[in-house]
Structure formats: C-alpha cells, structure tokens
Amino acid sequence: MGINNPGFKMKKSLLSLLFLLSASNVFGSADSEDVKDAIIIGAGLSGLNAARTIHAGAPAASMLVLEGRDRLGGRTWTHESVEMGGEIIDTDQVFIQKLVKELGLKLDTVKLDGEVFGLQDGQKLNAGTLSQTLGSLTRKLTVLQKTLSPVENTTYCDNQWSYAALLPRLKLTDLELRVFRAFVQDDAGHSLDETPLVNCSLWASRFAEYKELLDAKSSFLKRQFLKTYTFQYRVQGGTIRLCEALAAALPAGTITLNTPVSHITRAGSHYRVATHGRDFFARHLVVSAPFSVLRQGGLMDMDALGLPHEVQNTIHTMPYGVNGKVIVPTNDRAHINYFIDASAGTAGWSNPKGVTFIATLPNQVASCEAAVGAMGFTQSAPSQSVFWSQDPFARGSWSTMVAGEDAHGVQTRYTPSHQLHGLTQMAGPFNNDSLFFVGEHTCDGVTKIKANNNKTIPTGYMQSALFSGHIAGSYLGEKLKK
Ligand SMILES: Cc1cc2nc3c(=O)[nH]c(=O)nc-3n(C[C@H](O)[C@H](O)[C@H](O)COP(=O)(O)OP(=O)(O)OC[C@H]3O[C@@H](n4cnc5c(N)ncnc54)[C@H](O)[C@@H]3O)c2cc1C
C-alpha cells in the first residue's frame, strides 16, 4: 500500500529533520522538479478516490496525498471492528456498491428477509403487519383531527401542545402505539409525547404514504420505503477495508500520514502547501478537508486563492452536524434494527457489536448506557465513543446541508455542467482548472437525484464523498494525461 506513516513508526521528528536537510525549497520557492502534478489534502474517502482516479487516468503524474491524522479514512473509522463513523450503504447507492465490488471487496447485507421493521424492544414486524398497523393509525389520526373542537384545535395545534394530552383519545392498541412511537422517534428526533399535535394530520398523511409504498407492487417503491427504515449494506470487514483498497491502488509512498496541512496559498503559478515540517508545491490541488476545517483551521486565504464569493460563503456557513457517536456493546446479538429512545434525546441504532447512539455531548455516554440497560441488555465491554466536533480534522461533521447550497439555501453550484457531466454539484474547478474541492458536501448522492424528481438532496454520505473524488480525479486524470 502506498503509505508513508512517520507517526506510526515514531520517526516523525527524524523524518522532518531529513526533509529539512534534503529540501532546498523549505519555506521558499519550488524547484521545478519538486513541484508535484497534484497534491491531495486528506486521505478520507473523497481524497483517496480522487488520488486513485487521477492515477488511473494519468499513471505518470506525480502525486502526493497529505493526511493530518495517523490513519486513513477520515470520518470513516473502523475502530476495533466497530464503526465509529461512516458505515451504512443504502440499497440505491449503486455507485459505492459497484466501487466496493470493483475493488474486490464484498458487502454484508444487514436487512433480514421478511422482517422489515424493528421496534424499540427488538420485535420485528413483517411488511403485512406493518402495513395494517399504519392503515389503522392513519384512520385514527384522521378521525382525531376531525373531532377536535375549534377551541381544542387552537389549544393543541396553535400552542403546539404535545400528543401526550391527546394520546388517550386515539385509543391505540399496544402495537399501534409502539409503531407510532418508533416512527416519530426517528423522524422528529424526540419522543412521541413531546411531539406537537400540529403534526397530527401530517403523520396521518405520512402513514398513508408509507402504507402505499409498502403495499406497492413495484419493488422499487417498496425499496424506497425500506431504505429509509432498514439498514442495507456494510463493507465486509469494515469501512476501513474500502479505504485500504483505495490506497492500495496508489504507487508506493503516495500517501503521507501525520502530515497536517497548516496553510495553503499561491506561489507564482503553483500552490504552496505548508505543513509543520516543510512546504510542498503542486500545479493542481484537490482539497478534501471538510469545510468546517478550512474555516476554523484557517487553512486558506480565500481571496488570495481566487475563490468566488459563493464558494467562500459556503465554506463560511457550512453548519455543524451531529457530533458524536457512542457504541454500547451489548451481550445480546439480536439485531435491534431500530432507533432507541435514550433519555437525553439521543437516537440510536444497532451495530453488529452493540447499540449505536448519535450524541452531541461527551456526557451523553452515560445516558446511552442507561438506555441500553433499560432495554434489559447488559454490556459486554466498555463503551466506545468518538466526538467528531473535538477532532481538529473534522471539527464537527455530518451536516445535512444540500450540496450546492449554502446554509441559507443560496445556490453555490459552481461547476459548469458542460465541463463535468450530469447534475453533479462540485465546488470547482477554480483558477484555470487547477483547484478542486471534494468531499461529501460538494456532491449530490447521484443516484438519488432521479428518485427525488431531480431535486437536490441532503448529502453527507460516503457515496457522495467517493463520487466527488471520482469526478475531480477523472477530470484531472484526463488533463494530466496530456
Ligand atoms: C458518526 C458518523 C456516522 C456516519 N454514518 C454514515 C453512514 O452510515 N453512511 C454513510 O454513507 N455516511 C455516513 N457518515 C458520513 C461519512 O462518514 C462521510 O460522508 C464521509 O466519510 C466523508 O468523507 P470525506 O472524504 O468527504 O471527508 P473526511 O472523511 O472528513 O476526509 C477528509 C480528510 O482530510 C483530512 N484532513 C482534514 N484536515 C486536514 C489538514 N489540515 N491537513 C491534512 N489532512 C486533513 C482528514 O483527517 C480526513 O482524513 C457518517 C459520518 C459520521 C461522522
């Protein structure tokens, strides 16, 4: 595999010294033979795939991948065989599925045949039972909405009173209540009792729609539903296998770990990429560090780099997403296929090794453990947690911003569609096709576009990251071949 890992071998300082001794260009201008054709910043999925695609298109091109962490993968991280970041691949994410197979890897299917929906207590419902339950929930909610007096409507709807007050009037069976609870928990992120009644008719129509999808003859429609409520695939052996396979396609020595980039600027017609040990120079730059890192890490002088206003705006307004992931290993291997109500408002799901929670604060580990305990599971090992917001190379992550828009919904699609194909929304290329931004938020989830009537969709997927790398890499590979 093409990795230099100074940190792993505890030789970082020695290596830096060697760099200093050998490089005539430290903090100065570049000797032309020292200028790489392309430097890729970051060895996450997008950066790795960009590098791999450039190499496939232009095998003679000189290239470096500079990675700040001591490992590959970025916001995917298979830690002791547990996924602490990107993990799930949806059934309709065909680009990533195809890539995984091309790289000689396999996918594990997570969904269990005929069992489409798991309740909080682990009970599985088949499609028929679920459809029936959704039907009766729709009816009861519709009736309730109609029977509310004008006063009640004002009290409950306008004042956003919660279902807690009205649940008894719905007269739900135990199963209906549990299904209702599970869906609301998923969608709204808080419990049914806290959900404002203003959503009453909304939930009625949603359940009707879900039922229609479940009953549909078309397996495509059925899948559309299932993909939302069941997990589909994981890379066999963990997402790390995907990262390793991407890296293995690169020439030896292409990737350098433990090399945080501290600043990027222009040096004549080249880019100067400063790290703690030395400066690197390149004719083309692919930046895969998350926008929150670019903004808070002060990595680039955006005016000096000639970035258009819309792109600067995107970088400055990219919101933070979900920040932490907590895995509570349980000694029960039953596949708990659905979200669990953890007392602090966290949501969780199952992982082969235990129960996974998305949390926002480190102190939520305890509440996640309590939630598992409340389900009757005991822990088989200490919990594992990662707080991406505190990681200097992520600085928060997993935002659900729409690719090509800034946080205020302003279109920032930049790539002219005649230059790169399709509906892809990439930030770049800039400066005479020499600077590219890649990463999950620069790219639509491609295959989903059609399914959503050509609307843009929230990104934040491994597939988007890989596809953005593929687009930039194909473009540069073609250019550098010449
Ligand atoms: C908790 C969690 C769960 C998720 N679950 C899923 C899921 O189930 N399915 C799914 O499809 N997606 C999921 N995702 C999203 C998925 O992980 C990301 O979309 C994807 O990994 C992003 O890849 P990227 O290349 O865009 O960014 P990154 O992975 O962040 O890659 C950027 C790289 O740049 C490096 N870097 C940053 N700053 C510097 C610097 N200054 N110098 C050098 N290197 C630097 C970083 O270390 C990193 O390696 C999840 C994410 C999280 C956090």
Image (cartoon, rainbow, N blue to C red):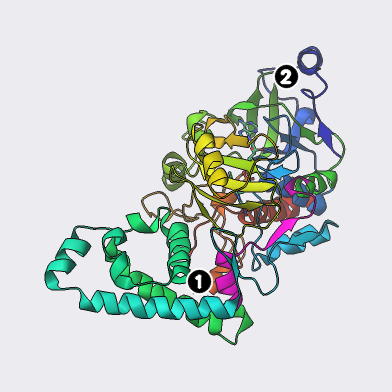
Tag 1: amino acid: Asn
User: Magenta stretch?
Assistant: 222-240
Mark 1 Cα-neighbour bin, 10 Å: few <14, some 14–19, many ≥20: few
Decide: is 374 above or below 71.
below
Which residue is label 2 attached to? 25
- Which x, y percent locates residue 68? 67, 30
- Taking the magenta stretch, the answer to whether it contains residue 209 is no
Decide: is 43 above or below 455.
above
Earlier residue among tags 2 and 1: 2
Q: Residue 452 — which label? A: 1
Mark pair 2, 1: CA separation: 51 Å
Q: Residue 362 — which label? A: none
Query: What residue is at 70 percent from the left and 33 percent from the top?
Result: 67
Q: Is any atom of residue 397 visible in this view?
A: no
Q: Say left or right for 57 vs 178.
A: right
Q: Nearer the viewer, mark 2 or mark 1?
A: 1
Q: Is any atom of residue 14 visible in this view?
A: yes
Tag 2: amino acid: Asn
Residue 273 occupies quadrant: top right
The residue tagged with tag 2: helix, strand or loop? Answer: loop
- Of residues 210 and 247, which is closer to you in this image? 210
Q: Quadrant of ligand 1?
A: top right
Q: Say left or right for 269 vs 56.
A: left
- Of residues 419 and 196, which is closer to you in this image? 196
